[in-house]
Amino acid sequence: MLTQSQVKHIAALKLKKFREEHGQFIAEGHKLVMDMVSSEFLITGIYASGEWIAENHSMVSAKKIPVFETTAREMERISALSTPSQVMAVVNIPVPDHTVSGMHDFSNSLSLALDDIRDPGNLGTIIRIADWFGIETVLCSQNCVDVYNPKVVQATMGSIARVKVLSCNLVEVLGGTPSGSPTPSGSPTPSGSPTPSGCRDEVPVYGTFLEGDSLYDQTLSNQGVIVIGNEARGISPELAPFITNKIFIPSFGSSVNGKAESLNASVATAIICAEFRRVKPNPNA
Amino acid sequence: MLTQSQVKHIAALKLKKFREEHGQFIAEGHKLVMDMVSSEFLITGIYASGEWIAENHSMVSAKKIPVFETTAREMERISALSTPSQVMAVVNIPVPDHTVSGMHDFSNSLSLALDDIRDPGNLGTIIRIADWFGIETVLCSQNCVDVYNPKVVQATMGSIARVKVLSCNLVEVLGGTPSGSPTPSGSPTPSGSPTPSGCRDEVPVYGTFLEGDSLYDQTLSNQGVIVIGNEARGISPELAPFITNKIFIPSFGSSVNGKAESLNASVATAIICAEFRRVKPNPNA
């Protein structure tokens, strides 16, 4: 049995306002909870049926995570799922490190940068795709849907436990002053406005545009950034100047009766990531 | 203003039971309605704001489609969207033709066969992918989510107007007796049980399996069938015997901290279709 205060606290984490206030989010279901337990995330409590606890207690107690037996009725109140599962974890939102403020190093791996992805299912699916293709970092613009939204967390199918997701100002991060070149002492501070000409780490920045070149005619690198645009508007005008390689996923539809005008954002991400890895396998895999 | 009876009739089409009873479904939003208007689907009525009607009347009246001016409050009652749009069409469900009962011809194009896809967003997204890649026919097993479910229709982003989606028994269609070889008159009817050894049209039948060969090591054809399995269980044991080419989408994740166990069904479909078309472009495009 939970206290009223526990139920109220956890149920409130469905809303972004309270997630930010408490610095916590929820993850539901056996696989997702287990993936979180195996990760570096700090779990403040596991809320589960007696049956789940009986089956998993040794593993959870080894990790010294507080476990609370929860009735089905309580689970309905705290769950964000229409059909609650047997187990939920309350997890601390990690404190952002220095990589969010223009210091991210793009030069030794492939990263994704998401420009205002608004649909929770898309964001979660993209994190799952990143995990599958060994892309360790996903940068989210500040207008992306909150990564700790329960629908996003569930759609990652556990990949949120492994992929580093950072919220940042993409204009600053893609165009900011080079982190590796310190300002000579005594010289004036460089102007704050970024130079719009590709990523400051001098790696390729790929982005999808209707007028881009075929994905299959591009030189694909396993160092660089792939920018994914908003579901409705594509890549924003503020980010477009930083794209060095405009790419287009060829469609092969018949043109007699028209054809699909676009692909879903997560579907496009998948096709692009698969092609990058087909051509240049992940050196760290 | 609509009559109470109209409101009740249209609102009921959100439920499968009433879609089947009336043989109708709804499509919402300007682009989707326009795609339906340009298609071979029969639209029985367009329900729209006065503003929409003023802007689009000439086009709609040229097609002789009845148009009903609808208040915002009425639209809220008939719409399946949380934020109703300005326009909705009520469309007749096409009467299935002979292709559903084992007579589909796989031999001159690439088709998709969906084995119990249950998520409406996945089914809609797969139809949109088929449209993008020039795959004209999507066969759905009888346990797939209803293609005329409003969430499916909306997720197709209009592609439902162009892609032929047929509900059928996939075991019969993939394994049934050859449609081109009529039974000699007077001879006994062949046994009803299909021979489980690939598609009866003798084209390759591709399907994803964890123990399959890499997608990139396969001989990909632009004639054949790609079977997509259920979100949780994959391809069902009844269909597995008909798969001639077991394929696997390579993951490139680091194995240090584990990695994603699988890809979303629509994401996997997209990667596979893109690779088929990259290797063997659509001859009809």
Image (cartoon, coloured by chain):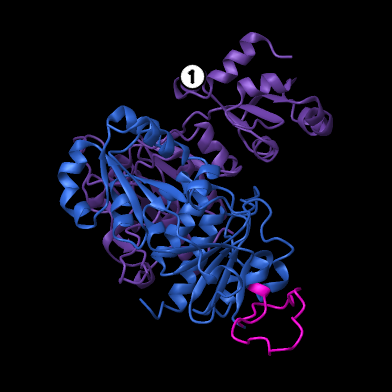
Chain colours: A purple, B blue
Residue B17: image x %, image y %?
55, 43
Q: Is residue A84 visible?
A: yes
| Badge 1: chain ID | A
Label 1, secondary structure: give it. helix
Nearer the observer, B190 or B248: B190
Residue A239: image x %, image y %?
26, 47
User: Taking B161 as reference, is B191 above or below it?
Assistant: below
Quarter holding the C terminus of chain A is bottom right
Q: Is residue A29 magenta?
A: no
Q: Which residue does the numbered mark 1 point to in the structure image?
A: A18
Residue depicted at 62% across the width and 68% down the height: B207
User: Taking B223 as reference, is B166 above or below it?
Assistant: above
Residue depicted at 36% across the width and 51% down the height: A227
User: Taking B97 as reference, is A39 above or below it?
Assistant: above
Q: Indicate the quadrant where residue A155 lies.
A: top right
Nearer the observer, B167 or A191: B167
Nearer the observer, A263 or B9: B9
Q: Indicate the quadrant where residue B128 lies.
A: bottom left
For mark 1, does the 10 Å Cα neighbourhood hold few (<14), some (14 to 19), or many (20 or more) residues? some
Quarter holding the N terminus of chain A is top right
Nearer the observer, A194 or A126: A126
Q: Is residue A279 visible?
A: no
Q: Which residues are magenta?
A: B174-201
Q: Indicate the quadrant where residue B71 lies.
A: top left
Residue A64 relative to residue A281: left or right: right
User: Taking B51 as reference, is A225 above or below it?
Assistant: below
Residue B21: image x %, image y %?
52, 47
Q: Main secondary structure of the magenta part?
A: loop
Count all numbered tags in the image, as a single digit: 1
Disc 1 marks a residue whose amino acid type is Phe
